Image (cartoon, rainbow, N blue to C red):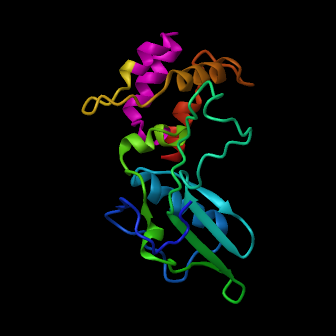
Amino acid sequence: MNTNFNTPIKKMYLLKTTLSFPKNGYSDKQSVLQAVKNYVLFHNFIVKVKNRKFPILHIACSKADVYCDKRNISNEKRKKTPNSSLTGCLYLLRFSYKKKSKRYLPLPAYGENEHCHNHPVTPENLASSHQGRMYLLTAEDATIAKTMLENHAKSHDVQKATVDMVTGMRKLRISDINNLKYSATHSDEKSAHGTTELIRTVVNEY
C-alpha cells in the first residue's frame, strides 16, 4: 500500500470544494464527526474513524486500506474472486484536541494527496454503501417506499419505484428493502403502518 502522501498515484480525484472549519474548531468529537459526515455525503463518499486514540482523531475514506486475505488461500485454490470495495484510498482528515482551549482543531495535510481519492467520487460510489444509499433517497422516495411497504408490495417493485429517473441507478438494494420489511414487522412497538427505518433515516437525519 502506498503510504507516501506526496508520491504521485496513477489517477487522483480531487474534490471541487474543500471542507472549511470554524476558526475556533469544535467543542467535542461528536460535532467534528457530524460536520465531516455532512460534507462527505454531499460529495458522494463515506468516511470511517480510523484511529480514536486521544488526543488525535483520524477520519479516513471508507475505501482506505486494502483487502487482507486472512485465510491465505492461493489463487489456484480460491473458488471465488475476492470482492472488496477497499482501494487503499489515502483521503484522511486529522483533528487534534487542545487542552488549553478544550477544542478540536484540524491539522494540516501531510501532502497534497492526503485530501484526494484514488477512486471516483460519484453518486454510484456513494450508493455502494448502505449509509450512502439512505442519503441518496429523497423525501418523495421515502414516502413512495413507505406506502408500498405498508401495502405489502414486492421488494422488486419497491426497488423499481425508487430508481433514479435520470441515471437509472438503483438507490435501494433488495437486501435493504427486506431489512426494512423485517424491522417494520419485528419492531417492539408494532403498528398498522409499520414505521420503518427508512423513513426515520430520511426525515430525521437528512
| 139 in magenta | yes
**Residues rendered magenta in the picture:** 134-159
Near-viewer residue (82 or 143): 82
Looking at the rendered image, the quarter that the N terminus falls into is: bottom right
Judge from the rendering whether residue 166 lies leftward or rightward of residue 126; answer left or right.
Answer: left
Above or below 156: residue 200: below
| 137 in magenta | yes
Q: Residue at x 63, y 21 (%)?
A: 184
Residue 76 position within the rendered picture, expressed as x and y whole percent measured from the top left:
62, 30
Residue 185 position within the rendered picture, expressed as x and y whole percent measured from the top left:
66, 17
Above or below 116: residue 205: above
Q: Quadrant of residue 170?
A: top left
Counting labels gives 0
Judge from the rendering whether residue 51 lies leftward or rightward of residue 193; answer left or right.
Answer: right
Above or below 55: residue 14: above
Q: Residue at x 54, y 43 (%)?
A: 204
Near-viewer residue (168 or 100): 168
Residue 181 position within the rendered picture, expressed as x and y whole percent measured from the top left:
59, 19
Near-viewer residue (81 or 43): 81
Q: Residue at x 64, y 59 (%)?
A: 49
- The residue furthest bottom is 100
Question: Magenta region, mostly helix, strand or loop?
Answer: helix
Above or below 35: residue 177: above
Residue 193 position within the rendered picture, expressed as x and y whole percent measured from the top left:
57, 18
- The residue furthest left is 166
Q: Quadrant of residue 24?
A: bottom right
